[in-house]
Image: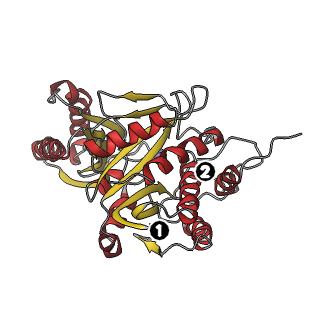
Amino acid sequence: MKHRPSIWAQLRQALHRRPELSGHEHETANTITQFLTQLQPDTLLTGLGGTGVAATFNGQQAGEHWLFRCELDALPITETNAFAHRSEHTGVSHKCGHDGHMAIICGLASRLAEDRSFAGRRTVLFQPAEETGAGALAVVADPRFKAMAVDRCYALHNLPGIPLGEVQIKAGTFNCASVGLAITLHGESAHAAHPEQGRSPAPAMTELLRQFLSINTSLPNDEINMISVVYSRLGNRGFGTIPATAEIGLTLRTEHNTSMQKLKQTTLNLAQDCAQQHGLGLETAWHDEFLASVNDETCTKQVAEAAESMGHTVTWLDQPMRWSKDFGAISAAAKGAMFVLGAGLEIPQIHDAAYDFPDALIEPAMGIFKQIAYQTG
Ligand SMILES: [Zn+2]
Ligand SMILES: [Zn+2]
C-alpha cells in the first residue's frame, strides 16, 4: 500500500503546486487565511506589509508575546521535478522550502489553537517577499505590527547538505547583512569608425571591475566583509557603435550593520573617483537590502535546549551564515533567534531547480517550535 502523506505534507504539497513570486503571494495568503480562520484565533491580520498574514492566540495565563515567522514567497525558477505536486505555475516554484516552513507554522498554529496552556500570547506570522528582502521590512513598517508589541521572535530555515533535523545556531550575528548596488556609467556614443569622437565607459568599467574583483583581500578581515561582482554589461550587441553606458552589479556583505555603512561608503567613493577621472556621468541604486540577523543570547539558548530535548543534534557555529535572511528586520524590532535545520545530505541545494522541501522535516521542526511556545519567559 502506498504511504499516505500526513495532513501537513499534503498542505505543503498543495502550497508547492501553486507558488507565487515575492510581493504577489495573494492566493497563498488566501489559503493560509482560510486555514487560520477555522482555528479561530483571537486576532487575525491580513494584508500585513502587503500580503502578510498573522494570527494571534491568547494563552490561559498572562505573559510575554512571542512570534513565530515563516515566508509566503517562491522563486522565479522553473521546476525540473516531475512528481505529482510539481509547480503548476511556469517559471515559478518553491525552491527555498517556504512551502515547508508554512506547513510547519500551520502545524504550530493548530496546536496553539487547541491547547491554550501557555502564558501570554503567541503569534504565527506568514510574511511576504522574503527573497527580495522587502517583506520583513514592510511588515515591521506596518503600524499593526508595532501595535502587536512582540517580545520575542523565532524562525528557522531549512538547509540541504546538513543531516536531516540537525540544528545549527549561534548567538550574535547569525546571517550577514547584504545589499546590491547597481552602478551605471554614462559616456557618449560614437560611430565605431571614430571612437575618438565619443566617450566610451569601457576603460572605467574595466578599471572598476579589476578593483572590485580584488578588493576583498584589502577589506578589514576581523569579520566578514566582502564584495561580489554579480553582473556587468557594456553597450549593446552591434558592431557599428561605441557604447555610451556600462553597468556593474555588486553585492556587498558584512557581519554587522555598522560595517555595512562603511563598506557602502568605500564602494561609492571608488565609483565616484573613477567616474570623475574618466569624465563620465554616474548613477547608483541600492537593491535588496538585508539587515544582519542578530540572535539574542537567551532566545538562542532556548532554541538549542528545545531542540536537544526533542532529540535533535545541535551544532554551535563560530561563524555567521554568509547568506542574508530578512528576519534581521524582525529581530531588530524584538529579541529573537533564527536557526538552520538540516534538510538532509542527499538533496539539491535551495534555489536549485530540482530542490523540494523534505516532508520528513515538517513534524520534527514543528516539535521544536511547540516546545518553545509552551515555555515561559
Ligand atoms: Zn531563498
Ligand atoms: Zn528562504
Q: Which mark is residue 93?
A: 2
In depth, the one of 161 and 220 nearer the eye is: 161
Q: Residue 46 at what x, y percent from top left?
A: 48, 74
Q: Is residue 95 left or right of residue 192?
A: right
Figure disc tally:
2
Residue kind at label 1, given as amino acid type = Phe
Return the residue at label 1. Answer: 57
Q: Secondary structure at mark 2?
A: loop
Q: Residue 197 at what x, y percent from top left?
A: 22, 47
In depth, the one of 268 and 178 nearer the eye is: 178
Packing grade of label 1 (10 A; few <14, some 14-19, many >=20) is many
Which residue is depicted at the point 52% across and 66% down? Answer: 24
In depth, the one of 174 and 185 nearer the eye is: 174
Q: Secondary structure at mark 1?
A: strand
Which residue is depicted at the point 39% across and 42% down? Answer: 303
Q: Quadrant of residue 323?
A: top left
Who comes first in sequence, dot 2 or dot 1?
A: 1
Which residue is depicted at the point 11% across and 44% down? Answer: 269
Q: Is residue 186 left or right of residue 88?
A: left
Q: Is residue 113 left or right of residue 279?
A: right
**Quadrant occupied by the N terminus:** top right
| Residue 192 visible in the displayed image | no
Residue kind at label 2, given as amino acid type = Ser
| Residue 85 visible in the displayed image | yes
Q: Is mark 1 within 8 Å of ligand 2?
A: no
Residue 222 sits above or below residue 182 on the image? above
Q: Which mark is residue 154?
A: none
Residue found at the far right of this picture: 1
Which residue is depicted at the point 53% across and 59% down? Answer: 21
Which of the two discs, 2 and 1, sits closer to the camera?
1
**Quadrant occupied by the C terminus:** bottom left
Q: Residue 331 at what x, y percent from top left?
A: 30, 53
